[in-house]
Amino acid sequence: MDPRVKYRNVKAVDCEEVQKMTEYFKSKSKAIEEKIIALSEAREQKKAVDRARVITNIWKEECIQLRAEEREINGQIRCQTYGWILSDPETANLIRILEEEEREFQQNLVKPLWTLR
């Protein structure tokens, strides 16, 4: 077969035009890549915010539950059946120490957490 017949539709290539097209598509793909990176960073930030929100909600629910249990137990201790526990000097000293530790805990950890909201 004659090569002129086989390649008759092939045209001469303008190297400058090809270079311009490749630069154009490279710049376009770079812009798309930057958008993808920006979207992934935004998604990661949103995940972090959502994770913090979930942890905060869990912490609040647990705090409410623990306070309810504390009120219930304190009510049971203060009733007449367990009055002898409070009259014991060692128990009174232990209660005072625990109240001081709780106050320190509230001051050092819980109040700063509530201020972060």
Image: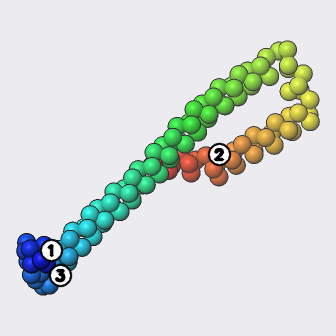
Residue name at image x 56 percent, y 51 percent: 112
Q: Which label sits in the foreground, 3 or 1?
A: 1
Earlier in the chain: of badge 1 and badge 2, it is: 1
Q: CA distance from mark 2 to mark 3?
A: 68 Å
Q: Position of residue 29 (x, y in %)?
A: 26, 67
As helix, strand or loop, the secondary structure at mark 3 comes to helix
Q: Which residue is mark 2?
A: 106
Quick one: quadrant of the N terminus?
A: bottom left
Indicate left or right for 92 with 41 as reference: right
Q: Which residue is mark 1?
A: 1
Residue name at image x 9 percent, y 78 percent: 4
Residue name at image x 45 percent, y 49 percent: 47
Q: Which residue is mark 3?
A: 19
Q: Is residue 57 above or below residue 104?
A: above
- Furthest residue to the top? 81
Q: Position of residue 81 (x, y in %)?
A: 85, 14
As helix, strand or loop, the secondary structure at mark 1 comes to loop
Indicate left or right for 83 with 113 as reference: right
Earlier in the chain: of badge 2 and badge 3, it is: 3
- Amino acid type, mark 2: Gln
Q: Taking the image as drawn, is residue 27 in sight? A: no
Query: Crowding near pointer 2: few (<14 within 10 Å), some, many (20+)?
Result: few
Tag shown at residue 9: none
Q: CA distance from mark 3 to mark 1?
A: 34 Å
Q: Taking the image as drawn, is residue 57 in sight? A: yes
Q: Which label sits in the foreground, 2 or 3?
A: 3
Res 12 → quadrant: bottom left
- Amino acid type, mark 3: Gln
